[in-house]
Image (tube, rainbow, N blue to C red):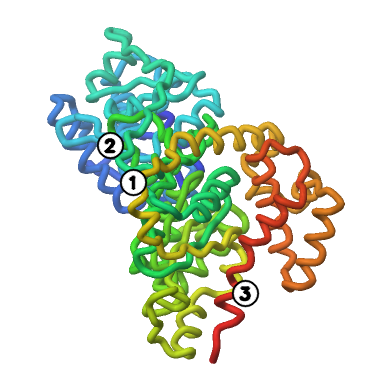
């Protein structure tokens, strides 16, 4: 007796179709699972066997061979429990009804309950692409499954619901798409809390509007962390495509909150400086997204930037340049999208008071140089905006004047981002910071005076080709905030000042 059912698998961010075949033949009782299964898939034999018995069904006392095809791709996890269960029931003629129009995904408990799994969204996207009409998923994944149109997503709590639906005795209502209501996070912080620091606020507004990376240098207590923690309150709203991309990554990582259908706010993650390079990049025995990928379409804040391990900092090179991160392990190579906005913060020296107006730095020139050299030139060159956060004076702290709120800043940021999305429509790019050199040349049109200023600055400052492109993109964002179609001298001048800090610290430290 032979039966086959459809299922899906996942490797990295990509999903693939799976066929679970079951053959029940005469011979000594034996239960084999083949098709390059990992340990978790092999253990499904015992979970399925116990589920069948505890649900008062007959487990075939025969030779059972289950093949999970294609056999050349390694199968991982417990998601194949349900299709293996259904294939055995179908082959042993205990299940009536046609299963050809369904795909099955889910982990079984020993009493037949179907448990929540990771990676539902990319698998459903693949099923829809392949024209599979309906997919059974765990009930606890129903919110995540309700996002998609064009496919019937059937949430089930146990195997009896599956059997009744397949046999036609009691149909399950698909979790049809509903209007996704955007949840507005209730932030406990606001930019109006920050006194002074007008230059830093302006730089972070530009960074948020254009998706630019930013590094803040300043003494302890100047407000670098305070500013960074308020960045989520001014980030532009996500498009549906961005929400779907981000949700796919969080689905694979199992990080979607149970009460949410989709990730609708830009991620903000702040790993500690003791984080390992593997935790940052992702990987493991089964390749999972790391912190960098979990920040896709959002912000990664790295406080005490020089204190991160050098391998961690150098891991950022590919994501900052290409917007993806490639992970190679013995099980295969995976590429995750990692279009992140990096916000880094650091002190100017080990003691933190180099250049402070009132406190004396106790570091030697050699110690300062060693500290600053922890941030390599290639990484610094990939960070668009460099700003100095100066200590706040008493008059600013005690001032009763109401500072600008996050809502006011976000309104300008959203307006500028909409201009960029309209300009870059159809390119797959949504902000100025991610423009290719060709796009930069096409969309960053300078006036004659602005071009002359940039030419003089390029020669005097000895800028790299990458820095030249980044200055143009920053100026483009400033022009978008100003509502200007062309880039004029004021925008170029402001953009240039955000690329001069490395000359003060990295190129002029003594020793």
Q: Nearer the viewer, mark 2 or mark 3?
A: 3
Measured in 3D between alpha carbons, the distance from the residue under mark 3 to the one under mark 1, in whole angstroms, is 51 Å
Residue drawn at (55%, 57%) of the image: 319
Circle 2: element type: strand
Local crowd at mark 1 within 10 Å, few (<14), some, or many (≥20)?
A: many
How many badges with numbers are in the image? Answer: 3
Residue 248: x, y in percent?
A: 45, 39
Question: Picture coordinates of residue 94 (x, y %)?
Answer: 26, 20
Q: Visible in this render: residue 314?
A: yes
Closest to the camera, between mark 3 and mark 1, is 3
Marks 2 and 1 close (CB-CB < 8 Å): yes
Q: Quadrant of residue 102?
A: top left
Dot 2 crowding, Cα within 10 Å, few <14, some 14–19, many 20+: many
Mark pair 2, 3: CA separation: 57 Å
The numbered mark, 2 or 1, whose residue comes first in the sequence reads 1
Callout 3: helix, strand or loop? helix
Classify residue 177 as left or right of residue 488: left
Provide the residue designation for mark 2. Answer: 107
- Among the 4 quarters of the image, the one containing residue 52: top left
Front residue of 143/31: it is 143
Q: From the viewer's side, name the closer residue of 409 and 34.
A: 409
The quarter of the picture where the N terminus appears is top left
Seen at 49% across and 43% down, the residue is 70
Q: Residues within 10 Å of mark 3 (few under 14, many from 20)?
A: few
Q: Residue at x 50, y 31 (%)?
A: 125
The secondary structure type at the circle numbered 1 is: loop
Identify the residue at image location x=87%, y=52%.
Answer: 448
Identify residue for label 3: 503
Q: Earlier in the sequence, mark 2 or mark 3?
A: 2
Gap in Å between the C-alphas at discs 2 and 1?
9 Å
Mark 1 lies on residue: 77
């Amino acid at each position: 007796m032979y039966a086959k059912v459809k299922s899906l698998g996942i490797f990295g961010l990509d999903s693939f179709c799976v066929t679970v075949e079951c053959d029940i033949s005469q011979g000594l009782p034996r239960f084999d699972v083949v098709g390059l299964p990992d340990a978790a898939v092999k253990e499904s034999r015992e979970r399925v066997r116990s589920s069948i018995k505890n649900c008062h069904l007959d487990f075939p006392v025969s030779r059972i061979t289950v093949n999970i095809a294609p056999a050349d791709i390694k199968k991982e996890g417990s998601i194949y429990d349900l299709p293996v269960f259904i294939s055995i029931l179908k082959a042993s003629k205990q299940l009536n009804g046609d299963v050809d129009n369904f795909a099955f995904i889910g982990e079984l408990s020993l009493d037949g309950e179907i448990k929540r799994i990771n990676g539902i969204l990319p698998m459903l996207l693949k099923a829809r692409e392949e024209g599979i009409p309906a997919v059974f998923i765990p009930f606890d994944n129903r919110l995540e499954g309700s996002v998609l149109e064009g496919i019937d997503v059937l949430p089930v709590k146990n195997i009896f619901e599956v059997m009744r639906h397949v046999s036609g005795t009691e149909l399950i209502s698909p979790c049809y798409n509903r209007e996704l209501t955007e949840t507005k996070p209730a932030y406990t912080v606001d930019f109006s809390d920050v006194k002074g620091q007008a230059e830093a606020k302006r730089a972070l507004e530009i960074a948020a509007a254009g998706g630019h990376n930013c590094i803040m240098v300043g003494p302890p207590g100047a407000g670098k962390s305070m500013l960074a923690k308020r960045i989520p309150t001014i980030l532009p709203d996500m498009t549906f495509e961005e929400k779907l991309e981000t949700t796919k990554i969080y689905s694979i990582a199992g990080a979607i909150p149970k009460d949410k259908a989709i990730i609708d706010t830009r991620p903000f993650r702040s790993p500690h400086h003791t984080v390992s390079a593997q935790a940052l990049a992702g990987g493991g025995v089964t390749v999972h997204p790391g912190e960098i990928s979990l920040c896709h379409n959002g912000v990664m804040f790295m406080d005490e930037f020089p204190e991160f391990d050098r391998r961690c900092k150098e891991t950022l090179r590919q994501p900052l340049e290409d917007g993806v991160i490639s992970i190679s392990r013995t099980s295969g190579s995976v590429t995750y999208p990692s279009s992140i906005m990096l916000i880094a913060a650091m002190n100017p020296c080990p003691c933190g008071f180099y250049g402070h107006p009132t406190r004396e730095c106790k570091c030697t020139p050699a110690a300062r140089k060693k500290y600053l050299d922890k941030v390599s030139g290639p990484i610094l060159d990939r960070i668009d905006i460099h700003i100095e956060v100066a200590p706040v004076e008493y008059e600013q702290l005690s001032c009763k004047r109401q500072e600008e709120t996050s809502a006011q800043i976000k309104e300008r940021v959203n307006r500028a981002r909409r201009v960029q999305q309209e300009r870059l429509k159809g390119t797959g790019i949504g902000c100025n910071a991610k423009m290719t050199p060709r796009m930069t040349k096409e969309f960053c049109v300078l006036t004659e005076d602005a071009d002359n200023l940039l030419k003089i600055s390029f020669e005097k400052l000895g800028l790299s080709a990458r820095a030249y492109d980044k200055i143009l993109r920053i100026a483009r964002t400033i022009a978008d905030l100003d509502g200007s179609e062309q880039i004029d001298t004021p925008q170029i001048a402001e953009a240039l000042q955000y690329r001069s800090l490395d000359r003060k610290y990295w190129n002029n430290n003594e020793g």
